[in-house]
Image (tube, rainbow, N blue to C red):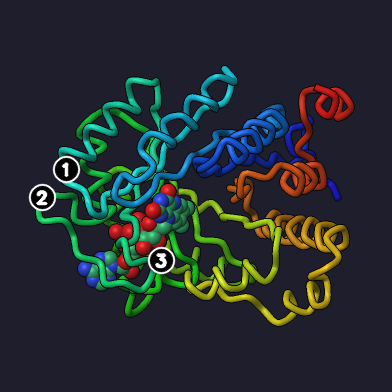
Amino acid sequence: RSVTGNRGSGQEIRVSFEFFPPKTPHMEATLSETIRRLNPLGPDFVSVTYGAGGSTRDTTRKTLEMVLATGNTPAAAHITCVDATREEVDAVVREFAALGIRRFVALRGDPAGGVGTRYQPHPNGYQNAAHLVAGLKAFGDFDISVAAYPERHPESPDFATDIDMLKRKVDNGATRAITQFFFDNDIYERYVERVRRAGIYIPIVPGIAPIHNFSALRNFASKCGATVPDWLADRFEGLENDPQTHALVASAVAAEQVFDLVDRGVSDFHFYTMNRPDLVFAICRLIGIRADKPVSELNAA
Ligand code: FAD
């Protein structure tokens, strides 16, 4: 393979990592270790998710502080508008901006009942993600990413409605879209063609989900409307009690997906890390993204 990741000349690949705020001291320790392992890979930015209705306001802030403490990686805060007034959302934006956050991932969020529950905008809130993007832009010159759905959002009646919403987000100031995860690169490519035909030219960064647990992933995917191809199920079949082979297959599958996307002209990738370092670290190595220190030093620290 001729990709060189961040190691010099050749086709450059940039990565970003997504973390979620930990719920327990044990999860916090795991995340801290994950940040320590992944930060030396030099991600473009790392993002921290935000619970609908402000449920993770404090833990998202603490996680952002953990990332900022590394001193060299830009942090992006996710922010949602579901079940919150504009004043509440604006107060969180102000709080995160005071930490030094200049990047946001602007999202609507899902209602408390979870995916599938009918969304009702808060009467005094931002109505949807496009409205939220406009609100963020009114605050300052933030770098704003939004969500995109190569297989359509589950609530969307058709691609035209879905892409129209993406267009509204871009018209209001979003400069990057990060996709829901997917496994069939043809679906992503067809989606990007549709998006470009609609006059949207921002980067549509693929969201890559390393598969830590295939059964859990399949359940989650069915709720998000993401297709799990038969060939993928076949690769993990029978590996439920064989974690080592499962992990090896998972890193090969993700690297293969990224290589194929690179061949199709993609250079930026967003990894859903699930706060776990090993798979993402291995996948990055396969695609040529190397740490600025030897691996032995990283493991020993
Ligand atoms: P929007 O862009 O407002 O709308 C999503 C879709 O709903 C539209 O594309 C459209 O198809 C449909 N729709 C909206 N309004 C209408 C209408 N009036 N009529 C018909 N169809 C309509 N959730 C969290 O809670 N916290 C997070 O940190 C988080 N991070 C995420 C990061 C990424 C990269 C992605 C892809 C998703 C994330 N989510 C997160 C999930 C997200 O909140 C949900 O997918 C939510 O259901 C939609 O949010 P959105 O910003 O895409 O909404």
**Mark 3: which amino acid?**
Arg
Which residue is at the front of the view, 60 or 155? 60
Q: Quadrant of ligand 1?
A: bottom left
Within-10-Å neighbours for mark 2: few <14, some 14–19, many 20+: few
Residue 98 to residue 127: above or below: above
Residue position for label 2: 124
The residue positioned 45% from the left and 44% from the top of the image is: 49
Residue where numbered disc 1 is placed: 86
> Circle 1 sits in a helix, a strand or a loop, which is it?
helix
Q: Which mark is residue 197?
A: 3
Q: Nearer the viewer, mark 2 or mark 3?
A: 2
Q: Nearer the viewer, residue 160 or 118?
A: 118
2 or 3: tag closer to the N-terminus: 2
Image coordinates for residue 94, horizontal then vertical, percent: 26, 27
**Residue under the point 43% across and 36% down:** 60
- Could you tell me how far apart the alpha carbons at marks 2 and 3 are, in whole angstroms? 35 Å
Look at the numbered discs 1 and 2 and tell me whether their residues touch, using CB distance below 8 Å. yes
Spatial CA distance of label 1 from label 2 is 6 Å
Tell me the element at label 3: helix
Can residue 158 be seen here? The reply is yes
| 40 shown above or below 168 | above
